[in-house]
Structures are given as C-alpha cells and as structure tokens.
Image (spheres, rainbow, N blue to C red):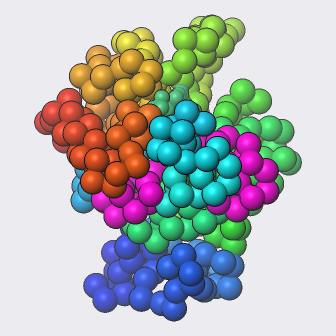
Amino acid sequence: MRAGDRPAAARERNGRPHGRRLDDDGVPVDADRGATPREERRVAMESFGARLHRAVAERGPLCVGIDPHPGLLARWGLADDVEGLDRFSRTVVEALGDRVAAVKPQSAFYERFGSRGIGVLESTIRQLRNAGALVVLDAKRGDIGSTVSAYASAYLDPSSPLYADAVTASPYLGVGSLAPMFEMAAAYGGGVFVLALTSNPEGAAVQRAVGADGRTVAQTVIDEISQLNRGAEPLGSFGLVVGATVGDTGHDLSAVNGPLLAPGLGAQGATAADLRTVFGPSLPAVLPSYSREVLHAGPDTAALRAAAERVLADCRAALAGRD
Ligand SMILES: O=c1ccn([C@@H]2O[C@H](COP(=O)(O)O)[C@@H](O)[C@H]2O)c(=O)[nH]1
C-alpha cells in the first residue's frame, strides 16, 4: 500500500507511526527498538525524499546541526563531559526538534566521549525523531563495500539503536562502494547524502581533479547520484553535499533530482545570499544547514528558536520563488 493511500487517522508524523506506547525518551517502544517485523516496517515507510519534501513544505528549508564543540559547551556553562553533552543535546531538541525540518547531529562530537557519548547520540536521535524532526546523522562514512554494509546496518536499519533518517557518506572509495547504504536506504525509507563539493578549502584539490573522461571527481559523484534518483517523485532520497562557500560550482547539478545539503553557512563565512550564486537553477532542492551560527545563541531555548527563525527567514528570502 502506498503512503498516500492510507486513511488520515493512520498517517504518520514525517512518515513515522505515532499514537503508540512510548518509552522514557517518548519513543514508540515497538518502532525504533527493533520489535516490529522487518516487512511491516518496510511497507510502513515512505521514502526519505518524500518525507523531506513534506517537512520542508511544513517547517521551512532549514537544517540545524548539533555540533557540541568544547568551546560551545563552555559558552553554555556546561562541563566538557558526557553530562554536558547530554544537556546540550537535550536543549537543542527541546528548542528546535518540533519546528525545524531537519537536524544534523555531528557524530564526531559524540564519539569523542566513547561508548557513553554514543549512548547520548542514540538518545538524541530518538528524541529528535519523536519530536518530528528528520535526523541527518553527519558521520561521513565510506569504505569497501563489505564494510559499508555494516555502516548501512548501523545507521539505516530501523532495528539499530543509531537508526537515523539519513546519513552522510564519503565517496572516495568509489560511489559504487556505497551501494549497501543506497540499498538499505531504499528498503527502509532512508536517505544518503554523498559528499560532492565540500565547504572546506582543502576539498577542491580532490573534488575538482579531472579524470580520464574529462569529468571532475565531483561531477562523477553528481552523475552517479543523479542516476539513482531518476524518476523519483517528488524528490529522490539520495542527496549531495555542496558547500555554500564554494561559489559558482561550475558543475552541472540539473539532473540530481535529490536534496542538496548546503553546510558552510554562518561560522564558515557563507551567507544565505550566496546560495543563489552556488546553486542557481538548482535552488529548489537546497537544504541550507547551520550549526554554530544557531548554537551560539544558546543555551536559552527562546534565543535558540529566535536564531533559527532568523536564519530560516534569510534562507526563505534567498530561495524565494524557487518553486
Ligand atoms: O562540506 C561539508 C560537509 C559537512 N560539514 C559539517 O557541517 C557542520 C558545519 O558546522 P558550522 O558550525 O555551521 O560551520 C559541521 O558538522 C561539519 O562537519 C561541513 O561543514 N562542510
């Protein structure tokens, strides 16, 4: 049965079931902890592209990153330890989980605390999803295909404690090596954002290198992701990361038919106005992403909301008329 065929009462928030018994984090006990048979979950899930398209329509084109830098923890009056990490993350969830389209926890800031940090990440993902935000886990994983299968299980299998709506992936062992992630995402309504033109200045030497066929590495990535999204409506589930700092890309994004995650705004120097230069006719697919620019406003939840509203207004203005 297609998601759109279901009666309204059975509809899900961002494609997920609700109205079930909840655990301490407010998570349906049979949804995210693996108790639901795989086939049932498979048919219950709408594609990530469709869910993101709806979330952006309802909440606006904005992704906020959770990047608990040591300096930000200090600025918020929190200790640089697991308790500080947990308080920081819960505050962002409380402030923004029920109002922004997507939230992007940066895995590195949780991993640095070892297993207890990963525990906080698991809990943060569950809280965010329960609040209705789509979770893009920024882990930038990539490896040989057999290992990518394990990454796919970790982040894109609904029975995993780290199950997110989408994950970032690195294509530098070949886009084809990421196939297990693409397959798992397709099976369970997940998404994958693949690095194409990253926001850092060092990325260009690799990404703009030209191969034997005359295409840059980035264009090869763009073309392979475009193939995966062919024919998808209203939006494909396989996205690209293109930094808002890169200027006119000089690359052809016209066939991507998937979301374009744009970090580099705010703290890295790019402004919402730069999105027009970077993305041109591809603006309709852009998901702008800010971390420190919004997080600097914390820990006051009202101030965090105001900061998110301010950057969302900037993005709406920059993307105006994109549809
Ligand atoms: O090209 C890329 C890909 C990912 N990132 C990540 O986004 C955030 C940016 O944080 P800000 O505080 O908004 O600068 C961070 O987690 C990066 O790892 C990126 O910046 N550029």
Q: Residue at x 67, y 41 (%)?
A: 108
- Note whether 201 is above or below 219 in the view shown: above
Q: Is residue 241 left or right of residue 262?
A: right
Indicate the quadrant where residue 71 lies. Answer: top right
For this rendering, which residue is in front, 45 or 24?
24
* Residue 291 spot, x, y in % from top left: 44, 37
Start-end of magenta stretch: 91-120
Whether 216 is among the magenta residues is: no
For this rendering, which residue is in front, 168 or 162?
162
Q: Is residue 247 left or right of residue 223?
A: left
- Note whether 45 is above or below 268 in the view shown: below
In this view, which residue lies farthest toward the bottom? 21
Q: Is residue 29 left or right of residue 26?
A: right
| Residue 56 visible in the shown view | no
* Residue 178 spot, x, y in % from top left: 71, 42
- Note whether 86 is above or below 211 in the view shown: below
* Residue 45 spot, x, y in % from top left: 50, 72
Q: Residue at x 50, y 79 (%)?
A: 26
* Residue 93 spot, x, y in % from top left: 44, 60
- For the C terminus, give its image quadrant: top left
| Residue 59 visible in the shown view | yes
Q: Residue at x 77, y 30 (%)?
A: 173
Whether 117 is among the magenta residues is: yes
For this rendering, which residue is in front, 267 or 129?
267
Indicate the quadrant where residue 12 lies. Answer: bottom left
